[in-house]
Image (tube, rainbow, N blue to C red):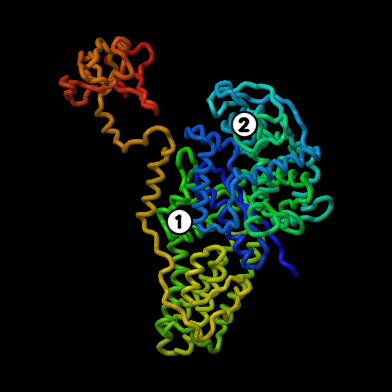
Amino acid sequence: MSKAKYTVTAALPYANGPLHLGHVAGVYLPADIFVRFLRMNNHDVAFICGSDEHGAAITLRAKKEGITPQEIVDKYNSIISKAFTDFDISFDIFHRTSSEIHHKTSQDFFLKLYEKGKFTEETSEQYYDEEYEQFLADRYITGECPKCQNPSAYGDQCEKCGSDLSPTELINPTSTLSGKTPVLRTTSHWYLPMANHEDWLREWIKEGKLDGIQQHDPKPWRNQVIGQCMSWIDGGLHSRAMTRDLDWGVKVPLPNAEGKVLYVWLDAPIGYISATKQYALDNNKNWEDYWTGDRKLIHFIGKDNIVFHAVIFPILLKDHGNLILPDNVPAYEFLNLEGDKFSTSRNWAVWLHEYLEAYPGREDELKYVLTSIAPETKDSEFTWKEYQTRINSELADILGNFVNRALVLTQKYYEGKVPERGELTEEDQLVLAEINEIPKRISKLVYAYKLRDAQAEAMNLARLGNKYLADQEPWKVVKIDPKRVETVMNIALQITANLSVVLQPFLPATAAKLSNFLNFKSTNWEDAGNGDLMKVGDQTNTPEILFQKIEDSLVDEEVNKLKNTDNMESKFEVQKEEVTFDDFTKMDIRLGTILEAEKVEKADKLLKLLVDTGLDKRTIVSGIAEHYSPEEIIGKTVQVLMNLAPRKIKGIESKGMILMAEDADGNLSFMSPEKGFEAGCGIH
C-alpha cells in the first residue's frame, strides 16, 4: 500500500515585524513536528512557507518607521528567516512574495480566473483618506463592529467575534493613516462572487465531499474551524474585492488597472504555490506534483486565518481548476502571555529571535514547553514560571534523570557496553510491551493533529523508564544479584534508544544527543517500539547532563523585563522608576502667573521669568526660549514646582521650575488650567 503524499504549508508570516512565541506555538512549531513525523514515516512531503510581503500591514509599518515598504520587508524577512533557521524549523523552502516568480504566478492565476469569467467588475463607493490622498484598503480602516461592538474591528473582519465585514458596515470608521474620518469615493474593482459557492462549500467542509465524491475525512477537522466557516456560510457569503487601490503589491495584469494591486488574501496564499515552484526549480522537480493529483494539502494556521484558508482560498483553487483543495486546516487558537494578550505595540511579547540570542542551546526546552501548552482547541497561556516548572520537573527530573541514570550505570558496571538480557520477569515483559505500544499511540495522535497529546505520549516513555529504574533499584540489587541488573540495564538502554527515535519530531536536538550517547541512530519511525534496538556488546558513551535546571533568577528577570518594556514600542520615553506616595506629597506644585519675561544673555535656550505664585513673586530660569518668545508668554498661567532647591543658572538664582508637556519630537507646551483658577492654587 503506497504512502500518502503531503504538501504542508505554514501561514506566511507578515514581514512587518519579528516572530513572537504566539506565532511559533500556533503555526510553525506544530507544522514542523508534523512534517518531521511524516518524513520519518517515509511520506513524500514538501514543507512550504515564506514571508508575506504585501498588504496594508506592510505599508502601515513603513509609514510608521519612515522608510519604504521594500526596506521593511527586507529587514523583517531577514530577522524572521534567521529565527526559523536558528530554531531549526525544517522548511523545504522559505520564500518571499516580493519575488519575481511570485508576482508572475499570482498574475497568471488572476488572469486565468479572469478569462474564465470567475470575477465580476463592480463600481462602488469606498473610503478615501483626503489627507493622504488615497483609497483605504480594509486594514487601513477601523471602527466599531456592528455585531459585537468591538471598538477596534478592521474593515474586513472583526478579530473579536470573527465576523466577515465590509468597511462601510463599521460604526464610526477611522482611517489608520490620518486618524480622521474617511470619506466615500467611487472606484472600480474585480470581485469574487463567493455566494455562488455556498452549496459545495457547505458539503465539502461538513462532510468532506466535493461533487458527491469523498475528498477528505471531516472528522479530524477541528470544531472551531468547521464552526467559523459555517458561521460565514450560513450568514450568507458576500462578494469580496480581489483588487485594491494601492501602490505596493502585485500589479493587476489588465490594461485598465492603473494603480491597482491584487488583494493580499488573493496574493498571499498563491505564495504557497509560487514557493513550491521555486522549490521545484531548485531541486529539479515538477511543482505540479505537489498541487495536483492524489495528494493531501495541509494548512497550519492561526484561528484568525481560518476563513481565508478554508473558504476563500478553496474557492480560488476550485475556480482555477485541477488544483487540490485542503485535506485539513489545523487552526490553532491564541497563546496569551503572563495573563495578557500578546501585543506588539506595547511590546508585551517574548520575541523568538531575542530568546534564541539570550538562551543559545535551549531551543528544545522552548519547543517542549510550547507544545505542552499548545492552544490546539482553546486559548492557552505562556508564563515564565510554567516554563521553569516544565523544564525542571519534566525534562530535567524525568527525561534527563532517566537517561543519565541508565547511561552512567552502564558506564559504571559494564564499561559502557550493553549487557546481556537474561530471564524476564512479568514487570520486564509489561515494560517491553509498553515500549511497543507508545509509538503506535503517538502515530495515531499525530495523524489526528493532536500534537500536544502526542508529545505527552513520547514523554510517557521517559516516565516509564524513570519508574522502571526506581522500582528495580539496580544500584542496590547489583550487590546481591548482578545478573538481574544486566537485564534491567539492557531494558533501560532499549527505552533510551526508543526515546532517541520517538523524540525526533518534538525535540530533534535532544534526540540527536541521545543518539550520540548511545552510538545508535535511526530516522525510521518503524524502528520505534522495538525492544531490541541496542545489541549486546554495543558501546555507549559517557553522557552529559541533558537539561540544566532553570533558576528563579531567570524567571524574575524575564517577568521584570516584560513589565519594564511594556511600552518599548511607544514613541515616548519609558516610565521612570517608581516613587512612593510619600515622595510625591513632598512636591509642592502650584499655579503661577508669568509677570515678566526676558532672554538670558549668551544663552539661546533660556528665559528669565518673574512669576507670581500667589505666595510671592520669584525669579525662575526656564529653558523654553526655543519654543516661546518673551512677549507671547506674559500673563500665562503655568504650573510651578515651588520647593525645588534654588540654584544659579548663568549667574541668576532660579527658585523653582516651570512644568511643561513634551511631545515625541521634543516640542514643549504649557499645561494651563481651565478658567477660574488663579495663582497660588495647588496641584495634587
2 or 1: mark nearer the eye: 2
Residue name at image x 35 percent, y 24 percent: 661
Tag of residue 246: 2
Residue name at image x 67 percent, y 48 percent: 225
Camera-nearest residue between 238 and 450: 238
Tag of residue 387: 1
The C terminus: image quadrant: top left
Camera-nearest residue between 144 and 193: 193
User: Where 496 sits versus 568, above or below?
Assistant: below
Evaluate whether residue 405 shows in this view: yes
Circle 2: is it few (<14), some (14-19), or many (20+) Cα within 10 Å? Answer: many
The x and y percentages for residue 481 are 45, 89
Q: The disc labelled 2 sits on which kind of residue?
A: Leu
Image-quadrant location for residue 596:
top left
Q: Answer left or right for 384 relative to 175.
A: left
The N terminus: image quadrant: bottom right
Evaluate whether residue 19 shows in this view: no
Q: The disc labelled 1 sits on which kind of residue?
A: Tyr
Residue name at image x 71 percent, y 40 percent: 232
Q: Earlier in the sequence, mark 2 or mark 1?
A: 2
Q: CA distance from mark 2 to mark 1?
A: 44 Å
Q: Answer left or right for 418 relative to 323.
A: left
Q: Residue furthest right?
A: 212
The x and y percentages for residue 137 are 62, 31
The x and y percentages for residue 513 are 47, 69
Q: Answer left or right for 126 relative to 422.
A: right
Secondary structure of residue under mark 1:
helix
User: Where 474 sits versus 299, above or below?
Assistant: below
Q: Are marks 2 and 1 in contact (CB under 8 Å)?
A: no
Tag of residue 644: none
The x and y percentages for residue 673 are 36, 16
